[in-house]
Amino acid sequence: MKDIERVADDLYLIKQPFHDHLTGVVVILGSKSIGVVDTGLETTPTEYLFPFLSDLGRKPEEITYVVNTHRDGDHIGGIRRLRKKRMRRSRFMSSMPRLLER
C-alpha cells in the first residue's frame, strides 16, 4: 500500500511525493459515507485515493463531501478526476467556484 497514515479510528492521511516534500489528502470514513479534505495532485485520486478505498472494501461513489482548503495545485489537482466519477451524492466545496463547474 502507498504511504498512508492512520491518524485515528476512521481518519487517514494519504501522503504523495511532490517535488522535495509530500502533499496529503485526508480521508474521513463514515459508516455510510466518506469525506475527503483536499484532492491532491491530478493523479492522486486514481493512483492513491481510489486504490486505498478499494483495499478497505469501499467505493469512490461513497464520497459525499470534498473540501479543498486552498487553491494550490497539490491541494486541488485531483478535483476534476473526482468529478469524472460522477458521484451524484457528493458535495464539493472550494474557494474557487469555477473548479466545481461540470
Image (cartoon, rainbow, N blue to C red):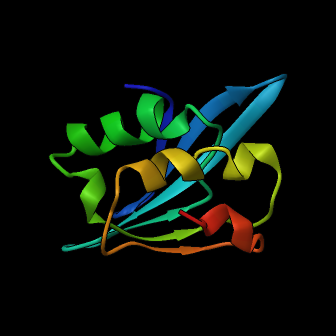
Task: Identify which residue, 42 or 14, lies in the foreground.
Answer: 42
Q: Is residue 61 left or right of residue 63?
A: left
Q: How many marks?
A: 0
List x then y, in percent, for residue 59.
22, 51
With respect to residue 83, does 29 lie above or below? below
**Residue located at (67% from left, 44% from top):** 77
With respect to residue 68, does 75 lie above or below? above
Res. 81 visible in picture: yes
Task: Identify which residue, 26 or 5, lies in the foreground.
Answer: 26
**Residue located at (61% from left, 67% from top):** 100
Q: Is residue 8 left or right of residue 101?
A: left
**Residue located at (45% from left, 28% from top):** 47
Tell me which corner region of the image, top left, top right, bottom left or bottom right, holds residue 61.
Answer: bottom left
Res. 6 visible in picture: no
Residue that extends furthest to the front in the rendered view of this protein: 102
Q: Is residue 71 left or right of residue 14?
A: right
With respect to residue 68, does 59 lie above or below? above
List x then y, in percent, for residue 26.
54, 57
**Residue located at (84% from left, 22% from top):** 20
List x then y, in percent, for residue 29.
33, 65
Q: Quadrant of the N terminus?
A: top left
List x then y, in percent, for residue 76.
69, 52
Tell me which corner region of the image, top left, top right, bottom left or bottom right, holds residue 97.
Answer: bottom right
Q: Is residue 14 left or right of residue 86?
A: right
Tell me which corner region of the image, top left, top right, bottom left or bottom right, holds residue 96.
Answer: bottom right
